[in-house]
Image (cartoon, coloured by chain):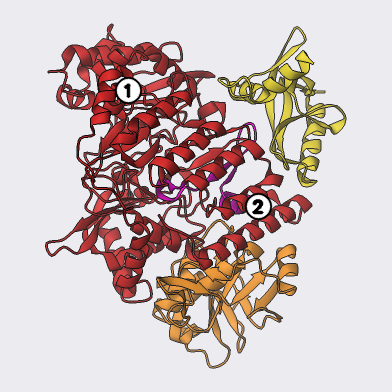
Chain colours: A orange, B red, C yellow
Amino acid sequence: MSTLFVNGAVTEDQWVSVDGEQPVPEGEDVIVSLAVFEEQPHALLTRNAGRLGAYLEADDQIDAIADHLELISLVALDFPSFADGRAFSKARLLRDRYGFADQIRATGDVRIDQISHMRRSGFDAFLVSHQPTIDSLTEIKDSGLDLFYQPAIEGAEARPALAGKSWARRAL
Amino acid sequence: MYRYDEFDREFVAARVAQFRDQVARRVSGELSEDNFKPLRLQNGVYLQLHAYMLRVAVPYGTLNSSQMRMLAHIARKYDRDYGHFTTRQNIQFNWPKLADIPDILEDLASVEMHAIQTSGNCIRNVTADHFAGASADEVADPRPYAEILRQWSTIHPEFLFLPRKFKIAVIGSSNDRAAMQFHDIGLEVRKNDVGELGLRVFVGGGLGRTPMIGKLIRDWLPEEDMLSYCEAILRVYNLYGRRDNKYKARIKILVHETGLDELKKDIEEEFERIKDGVLKLPDEDVEAITAYFAQPEFDDLPMRDESLEQAKLDNRSFARWIERNVSEHVKPGYGIVTVALKGTGEAPGDATSAQMDVLADLGERYSHDELRVSHEQNVILPHVKLGDLKAIYDALLVAEMASPNAGLITDIIACPGLDYCALATARSIPVAQELSQRFSDLDRQNDIGALKVKISGCINACGHHHVGHIGILGVDRRGEELYQVTLGGSGDEQAAVGEIIGRGFSADEISNAVETIVDTYLARRLSDDEIFLDAYRRLGPQPFKDALYPTKEAA
Amino acid sequence: MTTLKSPIAFTANNLLDGEAVWLGSNGAWVKTFDAAKVFATQDERQVAVEAAERADAENLVVEPYEIEVSQDAGQVTPIKFRERIRAAGPTMRLDLGKQAELATQAAA
């Protein structure tokens, strides 16, 4: 059983995941795996109804969808194990390099102690199956710190925390 | 040296509170060991053979007397009264209780110290030349850059779950005293023709299972681009570094398998994209950090101190110690002292809490309250007046830290090895102890001259054996310890990986093998002035193989 | 009743203080190797595995694993050198580790 958190709140998931076993449902918001996307990219990108989301596994690079991000409304990035940190950079690039402004969702081995790092890398949604993590997020208990030694997703908008330390930030 | 501001203090305090909570959740079972392990590693807490081990960060090896005293206090209060200085300029405690570690971290925080990211697949302690800010051959002090990198890398959200650990070293002189070319990123501070400061950047160096010398990726990087460039390198590594095999996961493998040119394309592309953004270093900030490392107010003294010269004449042991353990300082009338933690029969790099207190006192009194930890497991007093050297020597003598052997054959580097470490395949400390006893005669040591012996207890090479003039690697062959010898390695600017000389030696044979190597060198050197490394480079391995394996049973 | 190729013991580290411990009688974990229980059959091993997993799950010990031991005239010794060091302490610091505790006990 997974719980979806979007912008900090428990949210009902309106998206249907499609991994290739079944056909892509008409008119629904769908998240398709890269394999499904690459089978029929044009059809998926030009649907009349229902939004398109892309699901990338740890080995998938965002290059595969980079050219189509204008027509993609959600990117789900998987953490097969919390120790596999590739998705942090993918989220960062989606935000910073490609200007992707829609939902970036973390899936897989999502744990409370990595949530603030994920947020700071650009994730704004978390699909969680680890019960203690669900409990912590529901209580809005985030074990992250409020002070940062580097501008991550805060980027240029946040004011530097201190003069002489232009790379530091405080939580917004 | 750097002093915490309010931000730093708040940060470290919050981090300690966070870890205290994580320990509590582990003890209660809310956190499984699987989930706790990366968190404790990111706070420097290992589980070793006998107990937990806590690795405390000593940023670029620099500390002051109250910090050294706190390390002594921790050894006394929470541990077994000693600590171990490491080949990455850190200190390790071998017997802390997990339940005590939050309190230890709080004590450390009170003197502006921490154990953040001294372990785990993240950016580790940024190391630097242990003579920084004191040596006459320096272009610029590398430590401001190391400090900026330290801050930027601290809990960097994107780079906490890298394929593997990531080590950065910075030097400020063309004389490389930090083995810079054997780091994942190596930086050399330089000046251009118009006197601006910038960096030469190396990537993909490392030791371990597959030693590699770093590749030059940028001959010149403007100072203001340092963080952007490093961020680009880390991002490319995080995305493309191998995750299928722990032993092929360092950036050196990525460089080797992808090729530098192709990897450089990706790095430069990302760098171009971000270089004018938020990571560009403003001059004022670099100056502000640099100001922390301003040289202390030195006295104007003559180059020669007559009391010192007389003391040398009066005391041969003292004269010996001056000759080996005092290096030239940029300021006339001053010297850089190497306190050797390499007593005859002692474990290299270990210091008792009492010895740490002595070091703290000496640093405070005689070295402008500054000490350094070298990656060769000695402690440095960087700014000492020549006229104070005798008093320092006398104090070191009482504290059993006056070995006059800096850079000699008994100034051995050794990892903790199988006596402590869960990763080890053989013991390393007893080999070091035996060698230091065999070669204890100071006349003999001085006759042999400069010779770096480095011993690792397993293939992870924490003893840096690949860059030993004589390197010793302990392995396990059918339940017995076996020691493989490499020759001709060097961690200085003429970087070289040692060559395996032949079949390994048992624990009983290894000291004899080292003696044979030394005797071969002594017999074949051109003069007393030709040091071992130069003789090896001239002669090649054959004479040593012939001497070690006379019946031509060589591997 | 399959006899194991080599008799075994189970070892781990205490969660709270990190000390090396061995599975003793009645599922209790003991601080010195001489009190470790030796398991010689597949059935006994299975019981021990379950005890180890329980202790892990109950957050008493960390990373339990089995080690091979040899039995010689009533004297039980770990086969691997690493485990002998673990049972005694650092070989060049006889004042540290289990060997020091045992020496203190003997003297008392």
Q: Chain of mark 1?
A: B
Residue B21 is left or right of residue B240, and the answer is right
Furthest residue toward right: C26
The residue positioned 53% from the left and 39% from the top of the image is B92
Q: Closest to the observer: B321 or A150?
A: B321
User: What numbered label is drawn on residue A33?
Assistant: none
Picture coordinates of residue B513, whole percent (x, y): 34, 13
Q: Chain of mark 2?
A: B
- What range is drawn magenta here? B37-64
Which residue is labeled 1 in the image?
B318
Q: Closest to the observer: B314 or A100?
A: B314
Residue B154 versus residue B304 in the image, above or below: below
- Res B343 visible: yes
User: What numbered label is drawn on residue B36?
Assistant: 2
Residue B64 versus residue B318 in the image, above or below: below
Queried whether the magenta region covers residue B47, the answer comes back as yes
Picture coordinates of residue B15, whole percent (x, y): 60, 60
Furthest residue toward bottom: A48
Picture coordinates of residue B262, whole percent (x, y): 27, 59
Position of the N terminus of chain B, as image quadrant, is bottom left
Residue A169 is left or right of residue B390, and the answer is right
Residue A68 versus residue B493 in the image, above or below: below
Name the kind of residue labelled 1 in the image. Answer: Phe
Position of the C terminus of chain B, as image quadrant, is top left
Residue count near mark 1 (Cα–Cα under 10 Å), binned few <14, some 14–19, many ≥20? many
Q: CA distance from mark 2 to mark 1?
A: 51 Å
- Res B47 visible: no
Queried whether the magenta region covers residue B52, the answer comes back as yes
